[in-house]
Image (tube, rainbow, N blue to C red):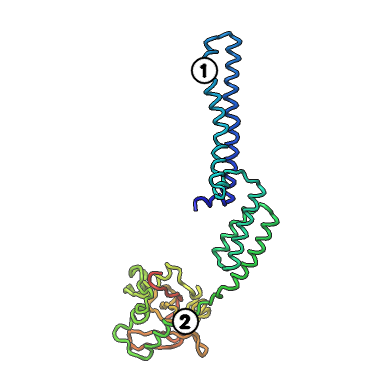
Amino acid sequence: MILSICDSPKVIEVMNIVNRIINIIKIVVPSILLFSLVFKFIQASTKNDNDALATIKKKAVPNIIASVLIYIIPTVVALIVQMSFPNSVYSKCLVEVSSGEIAIMYNNKAESLVSKVEETLNISDYISAKNYLVNVKSKVKREEFEKRLADVKEKIDGSREPEIPYQGSSEIVETARSYVSKDCGTDCSGFVKKKVLQPLGYLEDGIGSTSGYCDGKSRGSYGMYKKYVSMGRIMWERPSNATTPTNSITTFPGNCMPGDLIFYSYGANDCVKHVVIYAGYENGAHMIIDSNQQDHIVRYRAIDKIYRTAMPLACARPMKVGE
C-alpha cells in the first residue's frame, strides 16, 4: 500500500518538484563551493599570502570531494533503487514525469471514478467523481466527463422513491375512534393527552404557568398549546378578525391533517381551554374527536358543533417524544 502512492498523479507532481529541487542543489552547491575555493586562491595569490595559500590547499581536497559527493550521491541512490527494484511502483517517485503523462494519470483516475458511478448509481460515488474532475487538465476531456456524470445524475434522481405528501397520523385517529361513544371515565378532561397521545408516544406535556388563562385555572391544554407553538408545529391559525365560532373556521383546515390537534378558546382570545383531534373531512364537515367533563362520553362530531361559544384557535402537528 505504501509503494502504491507513487501511482497518484498528485504525489508525482510533488515528487517532480522535489526532484527539480535536488537537481538544482546538485549543481548550485558544488558550484558555490568550487567558486569560493577558486576566489580565495586567486585572492591569496595576488597578495602573496603564503599562509592563506597553505590553508586553501588543505581545504581544497575536502571541498572538491564534498562537491563531487553532493553531485553524484542523489544520482547514485536513485540508480541503485531503480536497479534493485526495477518493477517497484516506488521507483516512479524518483523519475521526473512529464506534464502530459501526469494529465493522462488524472484522466485515467477520473475515468475510473466516473465508470464506477455509472455502474453503482450511488450518490456518494457521484459526489466523489464530481469533486475529482477539477484535477482534469483538458477542458474537452473534463466536459466529456461532466456530460457522463450529468446523465448518471438523472438516472440516480429517477431511481429515487418519490416523496409521499404527509397525509396525517392514522394511528392517532384510529386510537381516538376506538373510544367514540364510550364513557372515558372521570379523566375525560385529559382524554386527548392521556388516552391517545401518551400511549402512542406523542408529546403531551406542556410549558408555562397559569398566567394568561382566562379563568386563572391550571389547564393542561393551554400548556400543551404553548409547547407546540414554541416548537413551530402550528399548521393553521384562525383569522385575526374572527369574533364568533362560525367565522373562526372560514379558513380551516389550512395544512391541518387527520390526527392533528385543534386547540379551542372561549371568545376571540388565546386562552386555550380545550383540545381535540381532527379526524378529517366527511359529509361536508370537518370532523373532530373529543370528550368533556360533563358526561364523560367521547364524541365524533363536526368542528363547529362543540360549544356555542368555543372557537378553534389553532391546529398543531403532533410530534413523537424525542424528535
Q: Mark 1 points at which residue?
A: 58
- Tags 2 and 1 touching, CB below 8 Å: no
* Amino acid beneath label 2: Pro
Residue type, mark 1 in image:
Lys
* Res 217 → quadrant: bottom left
Residue 17 vs 40, above or below: the answer is below
Q: Is the residue 66 above or below the residue 125 in the image?
A: above
- Residue matched to label 2: 258
**Residue 293 visible in the shown view:** yes
Q: Residue 206's spot in the image, x, y percent?
A: 36, 71
From this view, report whether residue 147 is shown above or below residue 220.
Answer: above
Q: Which residue lies furthest to the front in this view?
A: 84
Tag shown at residue 10:
none
Choose between 146 and 255: the one closer to the eye.
146
The 10 Å Cα crowd at callout 1, few under 14, some 14 to 19, many 20 or more, is few
* Residue 65 located left or right of residue 296: right
Disc 2 to disc 1, C-alpha distance: 101 Å
